[in-house]
Amino acid sequence: MTSYPHIKIQSEDFDLTTEVAKLRQGHKDIGAVVSFVGTVRDINEGDEVSVLELEHYPGMTEKALEKIRLEAHERWALESSVIIHRIGKMYPCDQIVLVAVSSRHRENAFYAAHFIMDYLKTNAPFWKKETLPDGNERWVDARISDKEAEQRWAS
Amino acid sequence: MLNILYFASFREMLGTANEELPATYQTVNCLINELAARGDSWRQALLDNQNLQIAVNHDVASRDTMIKAGDEIAFFPPVTGG
């Protein structure tokens, strides 16, 4: 399988400070770092959520995320970027996803991080399953608002 | 052979994560028609489903995508990561 050093799919947690330090390593021309961390909410569609389980499509996930990352690099002048997405069982307040980008000036980094997250939501093959406090499980439905968020970047 | 994968709610609904089938189909659509004939849940997931997502060899595909021996074809619902 092709390896993508700036894409990580892992069950273990990540540390924002460590990841940002790696992102900046060797880049003295960086003037801006923007990072986004997605976390598990304890409520969805009005119901309390006890467990969130993330499934993905090994192989396609990495390829899809790398495509999104490279497109961000084409659209904006970035120095470096990283995407980390966790899989498996997570609990409220856990970190799920990290997107971090660096650039010389802040505007490019802000736009690129936003773009990567919007595209990840609708193009990377991950699926969420929630367990409610009564033990019932349900697959999370895709949101129309996520599709609309992606479309704002159409050029 | 074709390697066929099913993810998330599809895997549960169809009771299988992956299977191999002979590469006798020209397009994804031909394959879907064959699979849909297996029963109601297959038909609902693959044929009557406006939101069906398809990938061929890890790239987003459509019903019209051509397929050949050795291809990996995946069927899944809309994605919900992030």
Image (spheres, rainbow, N blue to C red):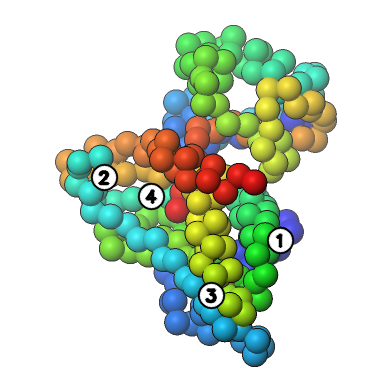
Would residue A127 be seen by someone viewing this image from the given angle?
no
The residue that mark 1 highlights is A74
Q: Secondary structure at mark 4?
A: strand
Q: Residues within 10 Å of mark 2 (few under 14, many from 20)?
A: few
Mark positioned earlier in the residue sequence (4 or 3): 4
Q: Is residue A116 left or right of residue B67?
A: left
Which residue has dot 3 on it? A106
The percent position of residue A51, horizontal first and vertical second, equals: 29, 51
Between marks 3 and 1 in the image, the one whose residue lies nearer the viewer: 3
Depth check: A33 or B62 in front?
A: A33
User: Where on the picture, by quarter, is residue B36?
Assistant: top right
Residue type beneath disc 3: Arg
Same subunit, labels 4 and 2: the answer reads: yes
Nearest to N terminus: mark 3 or mark 1 = 1
Q: What distance separates the C-alpha of mark 2 from that of mark 3?
A: 33 Å
Q: Residue type at mark 2?
A: Asn
Which residue is most to the left?
Answer: A134
Circle 4: residue type: Glu
> Could you give the CA–CA distance between mark 4 and mark 3, rounded to whole angstroms?
34 Å
Three-letter code, disc 1: Glu
Image point 66% across, 76% down: which residue? A79
Out of B16 and A33, give the one closest to the viewer: A33
Q: Are marks 4 and 3 in contact (CB under 8 Å)?
A: no
Dot 4: chain letter: A
